[in-house]
Image (cartoon, rainbow, N blue to C red):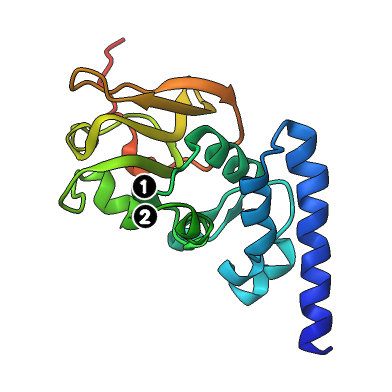
Amino acid sequence: MSNTTISRDTTAARKAMIDSQLRTSGVNEEFVLARMLAVPREDYLPADKASLAYIDRSIALGEAGHLAAPLFYGKLLLEAAPAPTDRVLLVEGGTGYLAELLRPLVAEVITVSAADAAAGNLPEGTYSLILIDGAIEQLPEAFGAALEENGLIVSGLLLRKVTRLASGRKVAGQVALSPVEDLGIPVLHGFDRPKSWTFS
């Protein structure tokens, strides 16, 4: 099979993803659709998983992380509404896909691994936008310090075993995530709350 045929086939798959998964769920903004059409998801998967690139579910990659469902990335970008002046801190899901979606839309993208972010080890500096490629149970204090006043954070949030898209702005030095809508999102367990002991 020629490279031209491969390219045409995956472009058709991306168009089908946009029409059947994004548009039908209310993601119609052109900047989101243009980026998700431009970036081949299969390029961010190992060869043995490439055929799964356009399914409507997340793809687990073991210790390497995950590639979340297309709808999560579409909704995340829609909620974030990235601006050309934004300096973005991205907590990576492990593939680099979300970073590639973002790069042409903002001034700068700085990435950090989920493990480092969960430990509070963030790159120095402050950011106008923080995105987390996955669902977290708690937000480490370091994120509040890294976010500029009136800056925005968009993430998945795990609440009572249900994952939701969530966002929050830093106001008067404080930031808290508020749920936006229920959505299937891979959980980043490094951000789990410590388990408390109970006695019967």
**Residue drawn at 48 percent across, 36 percent down:** 80
Above or below residue 104? Residue 27 is: above
Q: Nearer the viewer, residue 118 or 80?
A: 80
How far from the left and from the top, in percent, is residue 177?
Answer: 38, 23
Check disc 1 and report its element: helix, strand or loop. loop
Q: What's the residue type where badge 1 is placed? A: Thr
Q: Pick the quarter of the image with the C terminus.
A: top left
Dot label at residue 85: 1
Sequence-wise, the earlier of marks 1 and 2 is 1
How far from the left and from the top, in percent, is residue 29?
Answer: 66, 39
Q: Nearer the viewer, residue 96 or 89?
A: 89
Q: Quadrant of residue 137?
A: top left
**Residue drawn at 80 percent across, 35 percent down:** 24
For label 1, count other residues whose C-alpha is less than 10 Å away and answer few (under 14), some (14-19) or many (20+).
Answer: few
Identity of the residue furthest to the front in this view:
85
**Residue drawn at 21 percent across, 45 percent down:** 119
How far from the left and from the top, in percent, is residue 7?
Answer: 77, 76
Q: Pick the quarter of the image with the N terminus.
A: bottom right
Q: Which residue is mark 2?
A: 107
How far from the left and from the top, in percent, is residue 189?
Answer: 38, 41
